[in-house]
Amino acid sequence: MTTYRYTVAELRGQLRQLLLSGAAIALGVAFLIASVSGSGALVDSFSQTAAAEVGPGDIQVTGKAAAGGLDAAATERVRQTAGVAAVAPRLTGKGGVLAADGRPLDRTAAVSAVAEDPALRWQLLKDGRWPAGPGEVLLDTGTAHRLDAAVGAEVHLARADGTTATARLVGTLDERGAPSLAGVPIIGVPADAVAGYAAGAVTDRLDVRVAPGVSRTGTVEALRAALGADVQVHTHEASVNEATRQSSTLYGMVLIASLSFVLIALAVARMVVGNTFTVVLAQRTRQLALLRCVGADRQQLRRLIRRQGLLLGVGASAAGVLLGVALGAAGTAVVGGLDLGPVHLSLLPSPLTCLLAGLFGVLLTLLAVRGPAKAAAAVPPIAALGGTPASADGAARVRAAVWTTGLLVAGTALLVAGAVAPPPLSLLAVTVGAIANFFGVLRLSHRVLPAVVAVLGRPARKLGGTAGRLATQQLRLNPGRTGATGSALLLGVTVMVGAVTALDITSQSLVPVVSARQPGVFSAAATGGGALPAGALGALGAEHGLTVTPVRSATVDLDGRPTVVAAVDATRLNSSTDDVDRARALTEGAALSGLGDTGVRRVGGVELRLQPGRSSLPFTLQSGATLLVAPATLDRLAPGAPVTTAWISPAAGEDRPTARRALDHALADHPQVTVADTAAQADTLRSLLDRLKTISMALLSFSVAIAGLGVAATLMLSISERSREIGMLRAIGMSREQLRRMLTLEALLLSLAGALVGTGLGAAYGWAAARSITSTVGTVGTPPVLPVLAALGLTVLVGLAAAVLPARRVGRMSAVAAMRAS
């Protein structure tokens, strides 16, 4: 019991010195809780959105899309089944929304039937009311905003027969309730009006309401018996489970991605705690030696320090849990005030999450103090008399040098191998090589960082005068402490710059390739599908600044299912298009399959030889197509098959803007033709990678902030060590302002040293990672300037912030009190 009281008393005496280290652990634990809760909330939002599209029906009946959906006979059999109170066919087809100038919006619209029974309406009404007649429609809020159409306004729609109709907008739909139609304009009309607005309308689901008091399970069995094995019948609960089936896998992926950033922050926190305990125990060398003199053995000293680490870990982790819960409550309040459609989120962590995060924080602290405890236990009793502890023997130094050299050489070799080797093993080699190389550099931080400080100290000595000289000298005289403190910042900056560099170079390399590998620069298709008007095709061909490649297609019966077959003169396609060489090699009767089917098939009297290997080219050329054949083969399969899509590229010597103007001129009299720019796909990829860069920098900034606590803790401890020195400086005329400037320069030099080395390492690792990803398409680009400067700027701010408390403390010290300190 006496030992425990002594442990608590010692910890209380050092609490001020260990406070910032505890704050680092608390931040790490709070970050862990927030990441787990945020990941769960993000995936839960996907689940709720998917469940919203299931709708309120008691039972859902679905058919095979490849078979053309559910027919009217199936709907009638459902309606006649005992226990069924109401049935609503979920009828969808392709339509078109026209702008004020009569031209269609960018994409084909989805026409969706609004159920007559209010209890079976699955769409989410945002504003207005439900349509009651054929002249009334709903639009999704995004489309209504693009048209600048308010509820009650007239909108123009393309009809299935190619004419234009005017309808009244009676309400708007929340598109977030229909994730399967994301990015597509949605037109909601009564079920009996769908055929007038939609081409190719299909009933892909039946929503069923069960009569009161009737068993849902029994009704499901009755429907299965009535409809046969080709139709799936599920209760509402089973449909929701199916819709959210992938959530567990998605949760795992999101959680792993977020925890990777958390683990980096916690690794930095561990380094901060370990370094702080090392400094504190070094200051207590004589006290520890006296304990040895009065009979304490090494094991007892280890237990003493570990218990102090345990108490610190428990207290800091408890504070981190409270902070994480507070952040979750604040986040829930903020999210609750937002309009998230069908999603209702809570960011409050579960008790199990809090418990595990707290335990992890305690274990992390215990792991951090193992090294300092072992070193402290090795203090000999003679140190109590002012003797010098024995330094590491030559064999230990040789082993350390061998380990360091091995890590550096092996890591560099793997980095080089990964940069030149083909994927997929190249990325693994780069990852392992970067980790090994970084740990090698980390083992040399006590040599590397003081050397960088010496270089940075030259302008500091000139500009900062006496304060600059003293700051530089202090960091160089304590290389071990400088290396240990700066290594935390080194880790955070290296990972931040490496992630941003890899993503930026990957974006610069892949985005142009995505656009360059499209069959053409623009594509043109009739709104709602169907054949391109002959006049539009002729107008395009008459423009000398355009190269037009028509794609013909037809729907044939293949193995009992409707299949879209496309044909094109492949010699006119972009030579960089994926599988274009295979398309050019197609002979009559041969076909490329988008589904990976192989073998010989017969369509009517024509034999088709499906080539081995899956190809994305059929769908790329023609939406919905799964087979690509030579033009002569399509003539035999479907004589007179129309042109349904045209791929357009600038003619030789023309640029994209000029070609776009020529394209718009050619289609000025054909508003029913929709034009798509293939650059949109590249823009989507670029936008995704840009968001990943922003998220990575935001999450990794936590690591840099925690490392800043380590800098502040080291400076605070150094003030205690240098009290007499500070008193002497005050006595010989150094002002408080100069002392504060000295501490600030120490923090700034230490932060910049870690940031500069980390930037160099991160840029090299990031380039190697990007090279391993983009080696097959060619790696272009250099590390991004602005994000790297932002990382350096963040480091400078962290250094300045870390100096605030130490500078205030040293500014309040009087010369007499400082010189009296022991």
Image (cartoon, rainbow, N blue to C red):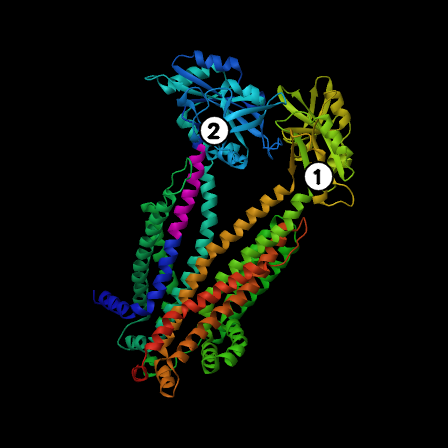
The correct choice, above or below, for 204 with respect to 472 in the image is above
Specify the quadrant that holds the N terminus.
bottom left
Q: Quadrant of the C terminus?
A: bottom left
Dot 2 corresponds to which residue?
152
Left or right: where does residue 81 sit relative to residue 506?
left
Residue 179 visible to an observer of this rendering: yes
Amino acid type of the residue that numbered disc 2 sits on in the rendered structure: Gly
Of 439 and 154, nearer the camera is 154
| Mark 1 lies on residue | 520
Q: Position of residue 247 (x, y in %)?
A: 45, 38
First of labels 1, 2 by sequence position = 2
**Is residue 378 among what the camera can see?**
no
Locate residue 769: give its quadrant: bottom right
Q: Position of residue 7 (x, y in %)?
A: 26, 67
Q: Which residues are magenta?
A: 32-50
Q: Is residue 796 magenta?
A: no
**Residue at horizontal 63%, vertical 47%?**
511
Above or below, comparing residue 429 to residue 286 in the picture: above
